Amino acid sequence: MNNFSSSISSSKVEGTAVYNLQGDKLGSIDDLVIDKQSGRVRYAALEFGGFLGMGTDRYPLPWDQLRYDTDKDGYLVNLDKDKLNAAPKYREDTEPDYTDDYGRKVYDYYGSPWW
Amino acid sequence: MNNFSSSISSSKVEGTAVYNLQGDKLGSIDDLVIDKQSGRVRYAALEFGGFLGMGTDRYPLPWDQLRYDTDKDGYLVNLDKDKLNAAPKYREDTEPDYTDDYGRKVYDYYGSPWW
């Protein structure tokens, strides 16, 4: 409802670093998952890990968990490392079916309102 | 409201071909533009042109104009070539400010309800 740009392109989101409120870098956004019907971004997939040739994990985060921080040039999420370690995740080569059941589990984990 | 996947990842949308109802290939989706606040995809940028070293043009399409067609493995839009040629566009290296004024112009052109 203003005349300034409030949009961002997916190509700029992908690759953007993600930090928690303690200032730890958690990883970077690797992909966005979009609800086809509404055109809303349901998850931003945080990429994390990938050392020793093990491949990386993806942590789907509800979009509303991300706050862009201009100083850090990255997203901030309220997520300590213990909570991230126990969060829903998948291997990069085994993307889940994004069912409603799966979605509710992810949204509940982060305390985001399911839609 | 069902238990099947109704989501798609941005990485799969990017690069997907776009056809009109006459079966002409118009180009392919190059980028998605997301409203930061709502997390909704405001535009899918159709890439078109790019011959003779001239660089390509981007045509921002309202998300609701795209229908995925499994036979063609691409998106269908109700858009003949004359209408596309006169549509709002920008050069790949001169992305516009996505103001409300700009958005209304694009949405009006395609007859999509502005939000």
Image (cartoon, coloured by chain):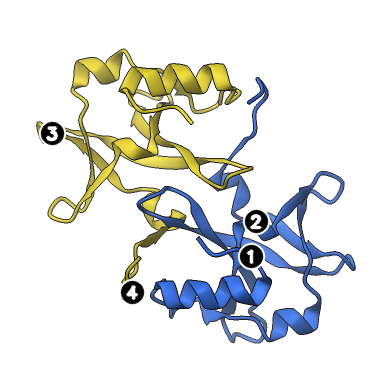
Chain colours: A blue, B yellow
- Foreground mark, 3 or 1, reads 1
Residue position for label 1: A112
| Residue A8 position within the rendered picture, expressed as x and y whole percent measured from the top left | 60, 39
Number of residues whose C-alpha sits closer than 10 Å to that of mark 2, classed few (under 14), some (14–19) or many (20 or more): some
Disc 4/disc 2 C-alpha distance (Å): 23 Å
Q: Nearer the viewer, residue A114 or A89?
A: A114
A2 relative to A81, above or below: above
- Foreground mark, 3 or 4, reads 4
- Tell me the element at label 2: helix
Q: Chain of mark 4?
A: B
Give the number of callouts.
Answer: 4
CB atoms of marks 3 and 1 within 8 Å:
no
Q: Is residue A76 left or right of residue A51?
A: right
Which mark identifies residue B3? 4
Q: Amino acid at mark 2?
A: Asp
Which mark identifies residue A93? none
